[in-house]
Image (spheres, rainbow, N blue to C red):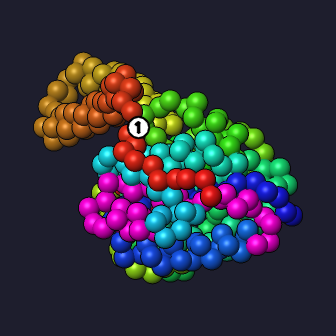
Amino acid sequence: MTGNDILYLVIPCYNEEAVLPETARQLLEKMDSLIERNMISKESKIMFVNDGSKDRTWELIEELHGSNPIYSGVKLSRNKGHQNALLAGLMTAKEKADMTISLDADLQDDIHVIDQMVEKYYTGNDVVYGVRSARKTDTFFKKFTAQSFYKMMQAMGVDIVYNHADYRLMSRRALEGLEEFKEVNLFLRGIVPLIGYPSDVVTYERHERFAGESKYPLKKMLSFATDGITSFSIKPIRMITVCGFLIFIMSILMLLYSLAVHFTGHTIHGWTSMIVSIWAIGGLQLLAIGVVGEYIGKIYLETKERPKFIIEKILDEKV
Ligand code: UDP
Ligand code: MG
């Protein structure tokens, strides 16, 4: 399938000086081959979003842009995290591109499925999800945490594509839909399926990071998972409510039981059972307050209506 639509690759980068030159080289090769085969327009670009890196990432992006205008750059005013950096890039690209593909700077996602993604775009799909077929190269820990995450999200009733990270093609129309989601607690994987429009899936094998280290330590992964759940699901609150209801029923039964014991004269009670129940109820209450607090925190942030990102500079000219 051929066409002349403009493709923008959007790549969030946080301290990626070790991988950037090689990534840029491989992506350029890919873009050149797509242009040669008349699959995309010559005005297509490779857009790097610098997410407040502390190393030479932005200087490298500037150099790349100087060497070839196919490389474009967006610089955020500070580190805002992967999801916000990605959104900043997508919203900037939306003004010029007919389709965008978001991918990580470390090229762990196989860039050769870009061809299939573009083909599926031309056959009428607005969203094409890249799905990992195998995680052979991931460590056991990464695999375990990532898969538990997908399972938990599904159990919580959040509609996400299993084993899909943020490697996906989106048409301009889909991006315009995305723009309508005004929430501050951003979890793109959960929002994109809510946009609708025809979509398809391509599968690929995930590679190892060829240089540098993961920018997602356990702390960031956990906050990402909590965000994902609490931004989309109120099941935790429901569970607490159900729990509270069951405990209330049980306490009525206990009351009847202790009254019966009292009137039959066996009034000597164990100290242990009392202490245990005090602790149990106390713990449950704290847990409940914690979960409720989590949501109040979200409301608090939403009411502030903070901007999700501020762009400091854009490097992008027509070729
Ligand atoms: N990233 C970012 N901001 C951050 C953390 C990560 O823009 O605060 C980018 C990072 O540069 C990379 C992508 O998000 O392009 C995915 O990060 P990484 O490869 O470290 O995650 P992993 O593959 O280990 O899950
Ligand atoms: Mg990675």
User: Where are the magenta residues, as a range?
Assistant: 36-64
Is the N terminus in the top left, top right, bottom left or bottom right quadrant?
A: bottom right
Foreground: 147 or 99? 99
Horizontal side, residue 206 vs residue 237: left or right: right
47 within the magenta span: yes
**Residue at 47% across / 45% down in the picture?**
88
Quadrant in which residue 141 is drawn: bottom left
Mark 1 lies on residue: 308
Q: What kind of element bears circle 1?
A: loop
**Residue at 61% across / 53% down in the picture?**
318
Image position, residue 55 (x, y; %): 28, 66
Image position, residue 62 (x, y; %): 40, 63
Foreground: 288 or 107? 107
**Residue at 83% across / 50% down in the picture?**
124
Horizontal side, residue 92 vs residue 297: left or right: right
Image position, residue 117 (x, y; %): 73, 62
**Residue at 19% across / 38% down in the picture?**
279
174 within the magenta span: no
Foreground: 175 or 311? 311
Task: Please determine whether, in this image, residue 138 is positioned above or below residue 92.
Answer: below
Quadrant in which residue 301 is drawn: top left
Is the C terminus in the top left, top right, bottom left or bottom right quadrant?
A: bottom right
Judge the density around disc 1: few (<14), some (14-19), many (≥20) Cα neighbours within 10 Å.
Answer: some
Horizontal side, residue 279 vs residue 316: left or right: left
- Count of picture labels: 1
The response on whether ligand 1 sits within 8 Å of label 1 is: no
Horizontal side, residue 286 vs residue 75: left or right: left
Residue 212 seen: yes
- Residue type beneath disc 1: Lys
Task: Please determine whether, in this image, residue 155 is positioned above or below residue 130.
Answer: above
Residue 142 seen: no
